[in-house]
């Protein structure tokens, strides 16, 4: 396999190209997208060449990666089908798998194997400008296809070269899990922010106090509706199934509180704590979390510059920063967010060596 075509060179497609260009120098990566996107992809090195048409991108490839939104997937499959050569591998990066695999089976020639893929990496809002060669490092990457088949193993080999961890799943199982740990949480976060938003219109104190746990719980509420509309439409059955289970448990909690039986909630809290502590800490999942470091700083000019320049000098990238509190003449605290625990630990070491008080919550 020497020639890969990436259809859709945005955050995921661009990151795939950058990663393969860095780790697999034997590959020739072709991209197809809107012309301005292709020009930028060539400039940043995400692709080697820009295909003038979808037909050419499909025709010249040993593997075609469909990195387009779910609602564009069927049209792209239709555009590729007449041109892709027998034996060419076709895969996608969509976050719903059952409907995509059904569409591929219906549209692609029988001589063209399709492997469903879903990398557990990304951002609330993504574009080629945010593409990163290390986006898939240690990320879980789900593949759905015929067990132990040559095409499945070939795509797995490509994915592993990104630094990702491959998990083989049945498409229906994937969609059921995604509904529980990604799609319904998005709806919950959106609902929580809607309630607080309505109340904050009457009392701004709600937003002033919405830091800490509430802020972390609702981080994904920043995701645009345009991203989630096709996901919720394509995985509607599994989302409704998970929502019904959520509704039943929520109703039980509501009943306990209504009847003054708050003590009856203890098993729910105990069970939730046990399950929560069982989540692997060294994997990126559907909702890739940031890792926070809290830094205490004196109230004097240059303090923030000292913190950021220290991290810059050590090559540590800050993903998010927030001033939590400040007392004039004394000091305050910053919350710095990093991509993962190793980056956070490295930041603590660098800042401590530079005379700053920094720690993580455990």
Image (spheres, rainbow, N blue to C red):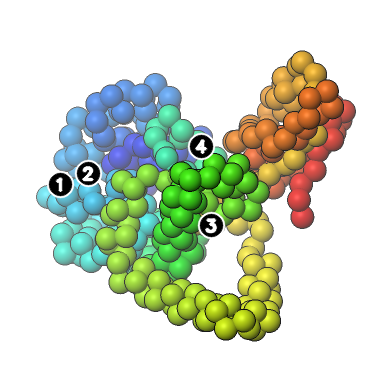
Q: Identify the mark nearer the N-term, 1 or 3.
A: 1
Q: Position of residue 204 (x, y in %)?
A: 54, 42
Is label 4 in contact with label 1 (beta carbons under 8 Å)? no
Using the numbered discs, state the Cα–Cα distance from disc 2 to disc 4 in whole angstroms.
Answer: 24 Å
Q: Identify the mark nearer the N-term, 1 or 2.
A: 2
309 displayed left or right of 176: right
Q: Secondary structure at mark 3?
A: loop
Q: Secondary structure at mark 1?
A: helix
Q: Secondary structure at mark 4?
A: loop
Residue in front for this viewpoint, 37 or 23: 37
User: Which residue in the structure is indicated by mark 3?
Assistant: 285
Q: Residue at x 42, y 46 (%)?
A: 223
Residue in front for this viewpoint, 1 or 305: 305
User: Which residue in the structure is indicated by mark 1?
Assistant: 79
Q: Identify the mark nearer the N-term, 4 or 1.
A: 1
Judge whether 318 appears above or below 66 on screen: above
25 displayed left or right of 228: right
Mark 1 crowdedness (10 Å alpha carbons): few <14, some 14-19, many ≥20: some
């Amino acid at each position: 396999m020497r020639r890969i075509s990436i259809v859709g060179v945005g955050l995921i497609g661009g990151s795939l190209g950058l990663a393969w260009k860095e780790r697999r120098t034997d590959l020739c990566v072709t991209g197809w997208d809107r012309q301005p996107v292709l020009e930028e992809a060539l400039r940043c090195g995400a692709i080697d060449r820009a295909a003038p048409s979808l037909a050419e991108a499909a025709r010249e490839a040993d593997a075609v990666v469909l990195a387009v939104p779910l609602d564009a997937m069927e049209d792209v499959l239709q555009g590729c089908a007449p041109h892709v050569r027998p034996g060419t591998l076709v895969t996608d990066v969509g976050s719903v798998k059952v409907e995509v695999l059904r569409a591929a089976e219906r549209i692609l020639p029988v001589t063209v194997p399709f492997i469903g893929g879903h990398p557990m990496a990304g951002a609330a809002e993504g574009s080629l400008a945010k593409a990163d060669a290390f986006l898939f490092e240690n990320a879980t990457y789900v593949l759905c296809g015929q067990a132990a088949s040559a095409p499945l193993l070939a795509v797995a080999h490509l994915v592993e070269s990104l630094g990702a961890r491959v998990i083989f799943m049945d498409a229906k199982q994937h969609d059921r899990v995604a509904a529980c740990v990604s799609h319904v949480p998005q709806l919950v976060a959106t609902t929580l922010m809607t309630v607080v938003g309505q109340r904050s219109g009457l009392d701004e104190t709600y937003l002033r106090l919405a830091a800490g746990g509430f802020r972390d719980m609702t981080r994904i509420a920043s995701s645009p509706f345009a991203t989630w509309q096709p996901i919720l439409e394509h995985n509607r059955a599994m989302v409704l199934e998970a929502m019904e289970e959520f509704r039943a448990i929520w109703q039980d909690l509501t009943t306990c509180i209504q009847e003054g039986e708050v003590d009856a909630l203890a098993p729910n809290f105990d069970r939730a704590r046990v399950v929560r502590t069982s989540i692997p800490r060294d994997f990126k999942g559907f909702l890739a979390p940031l890792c926070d470091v809290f830094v205490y700083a004196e109230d004097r000019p240059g303090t923030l510059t000292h913190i950021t320049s220290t991290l810059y000098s050590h090559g540590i990238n800050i993903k998010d920063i927030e001033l939590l509190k400040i007392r004039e003449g004394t000091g305050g605290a910053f919350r710095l967010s990093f991509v993962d625990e190793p980056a956070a630990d490295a930041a603590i070491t660098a800042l401590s060596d530079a005379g700053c008080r920094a720690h993580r919550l455990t």
